[in-house]
Every structure is written in structure tokens, then in C-alpha cells.
Image (cartoon, rainbow, N blue to C red):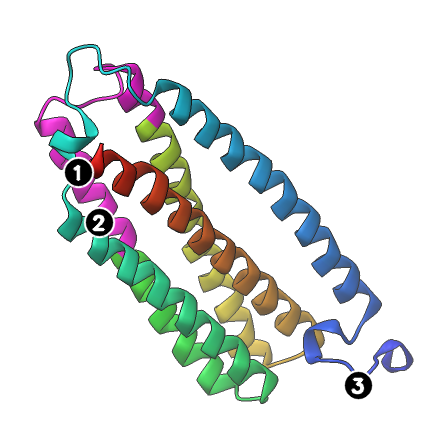
Amino acid sequence: MSANVNTALPLEYQTEQSRMNIFGFWIFLGAEIILFATLFATYAVLDHRYAGGPTPHELFEIKGVMIETILLLTSSFTCGLAIYEMHRGNKKGLLTWMIITLLLGAGFVGMEIEEFIAYVHEGATMQTSAFLSGFFVLLGTHGLHVSMGIGWAVMVMIQIAKKGLTPVTARKAFIIGLYWHFLDVVWIFIFTFVYLKGMVA
């Protein structure tokens, strides 16, 4: 087995299996891009169909959205630091930065849930209008992805804590990093085309 390990490459790429898995994950992210592109397109079509219900300008508040954005973008930075520490062979550094990343991600999810609850109390539900249906599906899908990413990362961190940094655990951590950065990019589009556009409309 050791003959199949190419130590000249970064740890996560050292085995053929890891390289294939990372390539496969890029293909998976391509499918995720199609999913979110479809949801964005649906939202764009339903954007101005309020049916007498609340409009984005009436619902959205810049303060909460900015805090959510700062939390998620900061988590992308700390996730990058975690992978940097992994490349240095620093297991403790990797786990520390990943814990910080997940705490920031959990804060984001918690704020989004509070935001949804506040909207519902104001009478803004999925059944209120086509606009709100598109909004809740798009934002809810992204929030669900972040929540699943947190659970997934926790399981990978447990494996790294037990087994140390190996080509297999490094590959799993690297893939989590790709996934997390992808979700941050999606949020930038949500922040721009849903919240900012809605607040200035």
C-alpha cells in the first residue's frame, strides 16, 4: 500500500483514491451549482409576486443580514486557516480552527432560524405569497446545507482526533473545506441578489 503513496504531493492528494474522491467531489459541486442556479432562477421569477403580503423592503433588515454575512465569511477564512494548518502537519491547529469555523457556522444558522421565526410572526410564511415561497425555499436549502456541513465536519474532526493526519483524513478535511467555501460563495449571491436587491427595490 505504501508504494501507492506519492509523498511529493500534498497529504490529501497522496493516494490515487484520494485524488479520485476529490475529483468526484468537484463533480458533485457542479450538481450543487445547478441546484442553486435553479432556485435562484425560480426566486427571480417570483420576486415581485407579493399577493398583498409583505415585500422584501418591508421585511429585510440590514443589521441582521450583515451579522450573518460576517459570521459566514469569517468562517470561510478560519476554514482556510484550518486547511493551512493541516498542510503544516499541525493536527491541533487544524482542529482548533475547524472548531472556530463550526461555531461561526452555528451562529449563522441560529440567526437565520431566528430571522425565519420573526418573519412568520409578522405573517410572512411560505403560503403568504409566491415571493415568500421562493425566498424560504432558497434560503432554507442553503441553511440546510450549512447545517449538514456542520454535522459532517464534526464527524471528520472526530476521525482526525482519533486517527491523526493521514492521506484519508486529510482528504476528508480538504473536501469539507471545499464544501464550506462553496456555501460561502452561494451566500454572497444570496446577500447580493436577495437581500441587497430587495432592500433597495
Q: Is residue 116 left or right of residue 104?
A: left
Badge 1 vs badge 2, beta-carbon distance below 8 Å: yes
Q: Nearer the viewer, residue 45 or 39?
A: 45
Q: Which residue is mark 3?
A: 7
Tag 3: Cα neighbours inside 10 Å, few (<14), some, or many (≥20)?
Answer: few
Q: Is residue 99 left or right of residue 167?
A: left
Q: Nearer the viewer, residue 133 or 82?
A: 133
Q: Earlier in the sequence, mark 3 or mark 2?
A: 3
Q: Is residue 197 left or right of residue 11?
A: left
Residue 49: where, in percent of width, then height?
28, 15
In percent of the image, x 37 and y 72: which residue is there?
99
Query: In what element is the residue under mark 1?
Result: loop
- How far is mark 3 from mark 2, CA to CA? 44 Å
Q: Which residue is mark 2?
A: 65
Q: Which residues are the magenta region?
A: 108-134
Quarter placement of the N terminus: bottom right
- Is 119 above or below relative to 78? above
In percent of the image, x 40 and y 77: which residue is there?
97
